[in-house]
Image: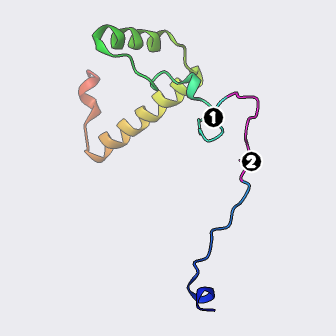
Amino acid sequence: MLSKFTKLKRNKKFEYSPRYYDDKGKGNPFKMEPKFDKFRTTLNPPRGLKGKFGSALDDMRREGDRDLKIRMVIIIAILVLIVLFILDFDLSIFFPK
């Protein structure tokens, strides 16, 4: 009767199967990888001066969104004008009389 009170409880056993398990062997089901990693150029940056220079040239060759560039130039111009207005900068020095 004493062994009934001193006996330790055993752990329960469960049959665990992952929800998104790929049984065909195409990858690890526990690895979380973002969708756009294969499109990022800065994920594994090249080492050395030549690799960095080549990466910079590739980034320059890649064409961006034209509307985004125009919008960015307009926003920067407006912010510069606001800062010049706050600092009370006289624009008349650029226009000769």
**Residue 19 spot, x, y in % from top left:** 74, 47
Looking at the image, which residue is at 49% across and 9% down?
A: 61
The residue that label 2 is drawn on is 19
Q: In which quarter of the image is residue 79?
A: top left
Q: Residues within 10 Å of mark 2 (few under 14, many from 20)?
A: few
Instruction: Tell me which amino acid carries mark 1.
Output: Asn
Instruction: Tell me which amino acid carries mark 2.
Output: Arg
Left or right of 95 in this view: 13: right
Number of the label disc, if any, that sits on residue 28: 1
**Residue 13 spot, x, y in % from top left:** 69, 62
Looking at the image, which residue is at 58% across and 81% down?
A: 7
Looking at the image, which residue is at 73% across and 40% down?
A: 21
User: Label 1 near label 2: C-beta < 8 Å?
Assistant: no
Left or right of 71 in this view: 27: right
Looking at the image, which residue is at 39% across and 13% down?
A: 56
Quadrant in which the N terminus is drawn: bottom right
* Residue 18 inside the magenta-drawn segment: yes
- Residue 18 to residue 73: above or below: below
Q: In which quarter of the image is residue 66?
A: top right
Residue extent of the magenta highlight: 16-26
Judged from the image, the secondary structure of the residue bearing numbered disc 1 is: loop
**Residue 81 spot, x, y in % from top left:** 37, 37
Quadrant in which the C terminus is drawn: top left
